[in-house]
Image (tube, rainbow, N blue to C red):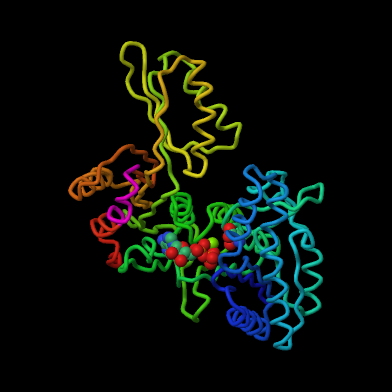
Amino acid sequence: MATIVQKFGGTSVGTPERIQRVAARAVRAHRAGNRVVVVVSAMSGETNRLLSLAGQISQAPHHREIDVLVSSGEQVSIGLVALACCELGVEARSFLGSQVRITTDDAHGMARIRDIDADSVVAALDRGEIVVVAGFQGVNEDGQITTLGRGGSDLSAVAMAAALKADVCEIYTDVDGIYTTDPRVVADARKIDRITFHEMLELASLGAKVLQTRSVEFAMKYEVPLHVRSSFDESEGSWVVPEEEGMEGAVVTGVAFDRNTAKLTVLGVPDVPGTVADLLFPLGEAGINVDVIIQNTAIDGRTDVTFTVSQTEMERAVALAQVVANRLGASGIVADAHVAKVSVVGAGMRSEAGVAVAMFRHLGQANVNIQLISTSEIKISCIIDEKFTELAVRVLHEAFRLHEAPAA
Ligand code: ADP
Ligand code: ASP
Ligand code: MG
């Protein structure tokens, strides 16, 4: 008897009809003799709707109350999916994060899973029921509802799969797999049959939202077999797999982009030891992630420090950096919300020189100016003007011939 975790995203449970199709799929897997755990997101648009309601009431809402509010979307979905399974003649039981119980730390809105005590889920499976778990939510030691960050139902599914030692974690979504880039941006993007955890982790963290970054991290750590596939048909999707012996990684596997990027430059920072740490420390304390960081050569004992943060955190970052800039006697801060990060990812880059230069040349030929560059072992990212995002993605996809199947 196999244990299967099936996760359905917002679009896949967006209407009562789609919920019935989700239930039908779960029931099919159950009747085929599997132990089935379904993890669901809120119906499409619901999490945004709830957040916007909060925004109309409060400018600085308490994180605890936001989690109470937004976690309700998933509560609706599990109730409906469980009802739909029962209608099809199979006993099903819904579980909130607190009922499973999925224990997290206290970081409301971005909580980390600490532990899953799945005894009651296992008992339900032993009774022959389909288990329907609310994605995106957990509970801290205190019993407070927490949420796992946007897209966090992917993480809930992977974590349940790890806790139950499931045979597979299937991520059902509105595309039929992982593509060389977002198929909504590049029409001839190609579906990737097998991608390594490392490559998928880079793609996700660089903006490919088909899988939430932490879910990939978690799946890699606990070796959860991950299958991303369509909730609308039966086609084989994409498998995320460990690096295999002799697996000849393509030089470039995919292109990712992130419009939720903003650039800050602190001008005229005194060029003495410790200033960059002073500048960035309060941002880290406030939970703001600083991404690309560049410091220029000093002229007359002063330098400019440029870094990126997510657009949604730009205002907070400016306010915090301004305090330190004033204290250090820097000459000012310039912020630009209209930038994007475009990245190419590929495990084969480790052994192949020249990918960076090719990327820069192709962007240059398309008249896309590069503002900042950052590289790691298997990726190269460029910060560019946001309005050229789609152009840059198309140019790079074409330049690295990603629409063509790699040579066998
Ligand atoms: P769900 O609600 O099912 O979790 P998401 O909207 O979070 O779905 O993720 C699926 C979306 O991810 C797709 O509709 C697609 O536009 C986008 N996407 C971005 N990059 C990629 C990629 N490389 N491969 C496939 N989809 C991608
Ligand atoms: N409903 C949550 C969100 O919109 C979680 C998810 O969809 O994975 O972010
Ligand atoms: Mg998602």
Q: Is residue 281 above or below residue 287?
A: above
Q: Main secondary structure of the magenta part?
A: helix
Q: Is residue 292 above or below residue 296?
A: below
The residue positioned 70% from the left and 88% from the top of the image is 88
- Direction front: furthest residue: 56
Q: Is residue 386 above or below residue 13?
A: above
- Dividing the image into four quarters, tell me where ligand 3 lies: bottom right
Q: Quadrant of the C terminus?
A: bottom left
Q: Quadrant of residue 59?
A: top right
The magenta stretch is 383-393
Magenta span includes 386: yes
Magenta span includes 270: no
The residue positioned 33% from the left and 66% from the top of the image is 189
From the viewer's perspective, tell me whether residue 341 is left or right of residue 137. left
The residue positioned 68% from the left and 44% from the top of the image is 107
Percent coordinates x, y for residue 382 in the rendering: 33, 43
Q: Quadrant of the N terminus?
A: bottom right
- Direction top: furthest residue: 300
Q: Is residue 293 visible?
A: no
Percent coordinates x, y for residue 287 in the rendering: 59, 37
Q: Quadrant of residue 47?
A: bottom right
The number of numbered badges drawn on the structure is: 0
Q: Quadrant of residue 179?
A: bottom left
Percent coordinates x, y for residue 219 in the rendering: 58, 57
Percent coordinates x, y for residue 288 in the rendering: 55, 37
From the viewer's perspective, tell me whether residue 338 is left or right of residue 391. right
Q: Is residue 20 above or below residue 240?
A: below
Q: Is residue 229 visible?
A: yes
